[in-house]
Amino acid sequence: MLDVNVTSSPVYTNYAPCYLADALGFFADNGLRVDATIPSGPGSSWLANNLLDGKADFAMGGIWIPLSYRKRLADLPIIAMVCNRNPQIIMSRTPVETFQWGNLYDRKVMLSMSSTSQWMFLEGVMKRQGADLSRITFLRDLDVNTTVRLWRHGLADFYLVDPLMAEELEDEGYHVATTLARSCSDVPWSVYYTSQAVLDRRDGMAPAFVRSIDQALKWLHAHGDDDVARAMERWFPDRPRSLVARSVARLRGDGVWAESVEIPQGPFDQYQRIIANYGLIDAPYPFGDVVATPS
């Protein structure tokens, strides 16, 4: 057995393949003993540094972190995709029949703290689709615990939330205006990346890890929502299984999970252009320079 340390973003239902690989024994079947408890820090700010400091072998988060580190701090190859679309959901206080970006005009839209990637992506997509951002008031950079309290007490007209929070708020009488998975195109939203040293190892750690996630992804597609929720109960001890299953169903229906962990070049390059326009990288990198297939 190879000991593997993983650092990842906070627990959300859209990361189901990561949890299933552990819960269903795919890691063990591939000769890995995985510790996925390496802290990711405030707003997942420690992810890349955990790799550089040797605290973790793999990190799971957005592509913008390894891209912004490239040529500055370290080259961190991106090796597998977990989410094929942005899983966040826009909640509304009133029903929205057919969502368009114009529904947000002259309204307040609240985002949560650590929303760099969410804001960067949302701004880029809305500009590309011709939305007038000057007509929308965005409330950003507040802690999620603060924003949800403020939302419940009347602040903002729309609220961008994670998939499980959306189910909770819907039960409270709020409404799903749209999901970003539905309103935006494919994007390699959540990925695994690693250090070059791990990728160069000859013991097969990297390909075994990627294979485990791919097997979990295929298991997810072959099983029902309740089966997936049941297998993940350890990660959501305080949430009813039915709530988790509903979140899985919505994510599945919106195409958040692709059929494999392979990273598609078109959506990857398109997201790179958004990241470049935002200013985190000077220009998109050649796909083959930043995406690697472990072998």
Image: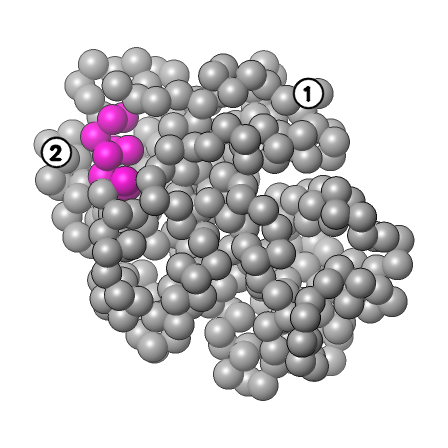
Image quadrant in which you'd find residue 113: bottom right
In the displayed structure, 240 sits above or below 188; it is below
Between 220 and 9, the one nearer to me in the picture: 220
The residue labelled by disc 2 is 31
Q: Is 240 left or right of 205, judged from the image as shown?
A: right
Circle 2 or circle 1, nearest the eye: 1
Residue 78 location (% of width, % of height):
43, 27
Give residue 283's mark. 1
Q: Residue at x 23, y 61 (%)?
A: 223
Residue 36 location (% of width, % of height):
30, 44
Image quadrant in which you'd find residue 31: top left
Determine the secondary structure under disc 1: loop
Q: Amino acid at mark 1?
A: Ala
Quarter of the rendering occupied by the N terminus:
top left
Q: Residue at x 46, y 32 (%)?
A: 264
**Are there few (<14), some (14-19), or many (20+) residues within 10 Å of tag 2?**
some
Highlighted range, magenta = 206-214
